[in-house]
Image (cartoon, rainbow, N blue to C red):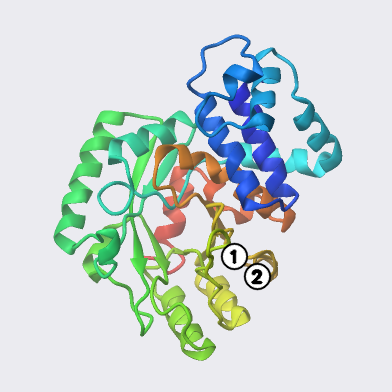
């Protein structure tokens, strides 16, 4: 076990335990820093000079680099028991990610760099979901820019060759009346549509419910993104108020997946709503909402939450092969 794997596994187990999002993110950050280390033993003092590495993560790096199982990891695994090990295996079965941003909207990296990072993680597919026009603060894509992006993705896939495919998509704003913020003919052309609320997050429950239900019943919508819009770190942002039973019932009926957003500051939906959606019979997408290549590794934390909710691969579209995913988005009323 190398330092990167040890740190990622600790982050997963901390998420499994419901630890602070700051703590979970600290181990993901250290894992990304540890990727720069050469093979072979590294002492803790040297490890701590890496950006984002503190005393605890430095000790993990030192022990793992010496081919030892880090003591902290061993304790967490013993405490978690076999259920957590099965959950880790579930995370290992991931095939893709339905929610990835590039520098075409508010991401920080080019499309090709995001695709290469996803492929390096062993993904078979990833969906490019830059923002839609109304989200101007995130440089949302006009219809013209989205058409251009479709050509860019097609050319990239021709270069990438077999084994991985970057799927076309969008994170489409859910407008006040529940309609989607993009032209229908363009939505028809996309492989996956993630629909999310980004405005008027503190609306009264009744209009918010109507807005969300209309969106998830739209035949273009495949995934309901970060359904409460909450932020659990920093100054934070409270979750939107809506009739969760009505929204999740609509998702189940329409075949729209509920996103388990893996960003540490989101953890959306909260555990109680995640269980409610599971009981409603919804499908789920374990998504990173990545805006940079290193954030694609956050996905394992979402699988920890999925496993705690009792979800298996049959309910998790991010464990499906490419053709199975595309067959689902093109059928069941979607697109």
Q: Which of 248 and 133 lies nearest the eye of the viewer?
A: 133
Q: Residue at x 55, y 78 (%)?
A: 247
Is 15 placed above or below 55 here? below
Q: Which residue is drawn at 39% across and 47% down?
A: 291
**Residue ID for mark 2:** 273
What is the x, y in percent for residue 37?
Answer: 52, 17
Is 277 placed above or below 308 here? below
The answer, for residue 93, to whether it is visible in the render is no
Is 269 placed above or below 61 here? below
From the viewer's perspective, tell me whether residue 45 is left or right of residue 153: right
Of the 4 image quadrants, the one containing the C terminus is bottom left
Real-space CA distance between mark 1 and mark 2, rounded to the nearest whole angstrom: 6 Å
What is the x, y in percent for residue 158?
Answer: 25, 33
Of the 4 image quadrants, the one containing the N terminus is top right
Is 295 placed above or below 269 here? above
Q: Which of 83 and 56 lies nearest the eye of the viewer?
A: 56
Q: Residues within 10 Å of mark 2 (few under 14, many from 20)?
A: some
């Amino acid at each position: 076990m190398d330092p990167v794997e040890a740190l990622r596994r600790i982050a997963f187990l901390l998420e499994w335990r419901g630890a602070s999002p700051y703590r979970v993110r600290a181990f993901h950050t250290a894992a990304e820093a540890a990727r720069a280390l050469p093979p072979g033993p590294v002492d803790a003092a040297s490890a701590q000079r890496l950006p984002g590495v503190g005393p605890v993560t430095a000790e993990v790096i030192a022990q793992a680099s010496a081919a030892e199982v880090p003591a902290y990891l061993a304790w967490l695994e013993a405490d978690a028991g076999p259920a957590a090990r099965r959950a880790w295996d579930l995370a290992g079965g991931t095939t893709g990610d339905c929610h990835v941003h590039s520098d075409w909207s508010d991401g920080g990296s080019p499309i090709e760099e995001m695709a290469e990072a996803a492929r390096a993680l062993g993904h078979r597919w990833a969906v490019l979901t830059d923002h839609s026009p109304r989200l101007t603060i995130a440089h949302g894509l006009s219809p013209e820019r989205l058409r251009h992006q479709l050509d860019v993705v097609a050319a990239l896939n021709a270069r990438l060759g077999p084994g991985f495919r970057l799927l076309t998509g969008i994170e489409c704003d859910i407008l006040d009346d529940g309609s989607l913020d993009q032209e229908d003919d363009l939505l028809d052309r996309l492989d996956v549509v993630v629909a999310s609320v980004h405005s008027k997050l503190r609306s009264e429950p009744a209009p918010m419910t109507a807005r969300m239900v209309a969106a998830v019943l739209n035949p273009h919508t495949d995934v309901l993104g970060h359904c409460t819009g909450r932020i659990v770190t920093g100054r934070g942002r409270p979750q939107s108020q809506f009739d969760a039973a009505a929204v999740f019932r609509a998702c189940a009926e329409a075949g729209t997946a509920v996103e388990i957003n893996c960003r540490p500051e989101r953890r959306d939906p909260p555990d109680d709503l995640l269980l409610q959606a599971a009981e409603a019979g919804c499908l789920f997408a374990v998504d990173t909402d990545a805006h940079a290549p290193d954030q694609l590794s956050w996905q394992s934390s979402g699988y920890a939450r999925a496993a705690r909710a009792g979800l298996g691969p049959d309910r998790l579209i991010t464990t499906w092969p490419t053709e199975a995913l595309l067959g689902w988005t093109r059928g069941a009323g979607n697109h």
